[in-house]
Amino acid sequence: MSILADTTEKKALYEIAKTLRFFENLECLQISAGDAVRIRHAENIIKSVIGGNGFDAVFSKRRGTHLIKQKP
C-alpha cells in the first residue's frame, strides 16, 4: 500500500517511467483493436502522471530510463 502525499516523489516517478519501455515491444505484435485502445490509454495515463509532476521520461537502450525536468 502506498503512502498518499501532496506530490509524488521522484523515485516513484522513476519506477513508473521504467514500465514505458515495455509498451514499445508491443508495436510489432498482433493485438485486437479493443486491446490496443486500452493499452494506449494506459500508456497515456502513465505519461500524464509523469508529465503532471513536471518530468518527461526518456529511454535509450544504452543508458536506460531517465527523468528529465520539464522546462517552464
Image (tube, rainbow, N blue to C red):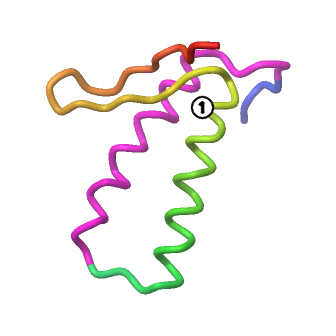
Q: Which residue is mark 1?
A: 50
At 72% from the left edge and 36% from the top edge, which residue is drawn?
A: 1
Image: magenta residue range: 5-29
Asked whether 18 falls inside the magenta stretch, the response is: yes
Amino acid type shown at disc 1: Ile
Farthest-out residue, front: 72
- The secondary structure that most of the magenta stretch takes on is helix
Q: Is residue 32 left or right of residue 8?
A: left
The image quarter containing residue 53 is: top right
At 73% from the left edge and 31% from the top edge, which residue is drawn?
A: 2
Q: Is residue 31 left or right of residue 25?
A: right
At 69% from the left edge and 30% from the top edge, which residue is drawn?
A: 52
Position in image of residue 47 (x %, y %): 56, 41
Q: Is residue 22 above or below residue 67?
A: below
* Count of numbered badges drawn on the protein: 1
Position in image of residue 56 (x %, y %): 50, 27
Position in image of residue 22 (x %, y %): 34, 50
Categorize mark 1 by other alpha carbons within 10 Å: few (<14), some (14-19), many (20+).
many
Report the front residue among 37 and 2.
Answer: 37
The image quarter containing residue 55 is: top right
Q: Is residue 2 above or below residue 38?
A: above
Report the front residue among 43 and 6.
Answer: 43
Which quadrant, please, contains the C terminus? Answer: top right
Asked whether 42 falls inside the magenta stretch, the response is: no
- What is the secondary structure assignment of the residue under circle 1? helix
